[in-house]
Amino acid sequence: MKTYKIAILAGDGIGPEIMREAIKVFKLVEERNAVRFELLEAAFGGQAYFETGHPFPEETKAICDAADAIIKGPIGLSHEESQKIPVDMQPERGALLPLRARFNTYANFRPVYLPKAIASFSPLKPEIVGEGIDIIMVRELVGGLYFGHKETGVNEQGQRYVKEVLEYDEGQIRQILHEGFKLANRRKKVLHNIHKSNVLKSSVLWNEIVAELAPQYPDVKVVHMLVDAAATHLCLNPTQFDVMVMENMFGDILSDQGGGILGSLGLMPSACMGAEKAYYEPSHGSAPDIAGKNIANPYSMIGSVAMMLEMSFGMEEEAKNVWAAMQGVFADGYSTPDLSRGGADVQLISTDAFGDKVVEKLRAMPVPGN
Ligand code: IPM
Ligand code: MG
């Protein structure tokens, strides 16, 4: 029987409560399939800093190093709590970016997925959502402004200044573009290349490499789009997109907009893939304002489980079942208070009740291969 070690980093805010629901899904998948998961919980994020003095403790690093895959909840603290931590130890800079760098998880896949069952969450008009939105944003995750040289100081005029470098080499660009092209090839064969080559030299090089790689994917049609225009098109006509590829900072911003057109970042799981290791995480923050209230929807966390099953363990069918189970719970008229827009037809349930319903749906589905 296949056994996988999974590092569980519950994170901050709503992290622990939505992770609990994800763990229920791992347990059921294990029960239904010829697979064993060894779940290793480890401290990570702001809470980890207060408990151990570091947001990415050595012990957690060792657990992640030894794991076959990592699942991570959201991290981050309220503004007030963050202020109690030195800037470089704050969970984003002290834990999340180092996690990405450690495992060189350069390819971030963010589905912006709105099937019919949850179409009413979208703030867009039904005629714009049409048959539903089904985009995957492919974001470069370990380069660009996030990881470039940073400098602050006082210049000769006595002014405080800051300098942050947006740097990519061709190898980094090539590897993320290959991911975009390969995915487009497996899907609808249209790749939206998102750039800002009218201003940024980094985009000029990026686009040169797009042109160099395109002949290797003759079936894929490349559509070039400036990042600012893409932001508009995502609102006006999101169904024109299938796979979008972009550099790190553009991807950070447009993927949040993706959550916006779905109606909530709570509907955004993601996969962060390196050559050797992958980790999975919701695209959203830790929502300290609703933490501990048992009202956060676990969709993004359970969706991250589905992405792990598919992308790390090759369990495509079971991954589809997990997605379908979640859609099914919405289709039955259930939601959690954080996601609901009200309406008489929606029955509000808690985080754990939602997780239980997902598990119940999944249990009722045929086991793949049986
Ligand atoms: C994301 C988040 C992170 C990012 C933050 C928490 C550092 O916004 O994963 O999109 O900017 O990459
Ligand atoms: Mg972001």
Image: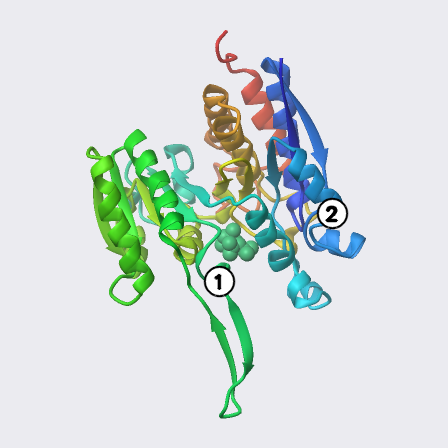
Q: Nearer the viewer, residue 277 or 335?
A: 277
Q: Nearer the viewer, residue 96 or 32?
A: 96
Residue 157 vertical placement versus 340 (above, below): below
Count of numbered circles in the view: 2
Q: Residue at x 38, y 34 (%)?
A: 115
Q: Position of residue 327 (x, y in %)?
A: 47, 30
Residue 260 vertical placement versus 178 (above, below): below
Q: Which amino acid lies under the numbered mark 2 shown in the image of this protein?
A: Glu
Task: From the viewer's perspective, tell me whether residue 263 is left or right of residue 32.
Answer: left
User: Disc 2 on helix, strand or loop?
Assistant: helix
- Asked if residue 218 can be seen in this view, the reply is yes
| Tag of residue 263 | none
Residue 196 vertical placement versus 219 (above, below): below
Marks 2/1 in contact by CB < 8 Å: the verdict is no
Find residue 299 and report its image quarter.
top right
Q: Residue at x 44, y 43 (%)?
A: 107
Q: Nearer the viewer, residue 204 or 359?
A: 204
Q: Which amino acid lies under the numbered mark 1 shown in the image of this protein?
A: Gly
- What is the C-alpha distance between the residues marked 2 and 1? 25 Å
| Tag of residue 148 | 1
| Tag of residue 58 | 2
Find residue 97 and report its image quarter.
bottom right
Q: Earlier in the sequence, mark 2 or mark 1?
A: 2
Q: Position of residue 179 (x, y in %)?
A: 37, 39
Q: Position of residue 351 (x, y in %)?
A: 63, 38
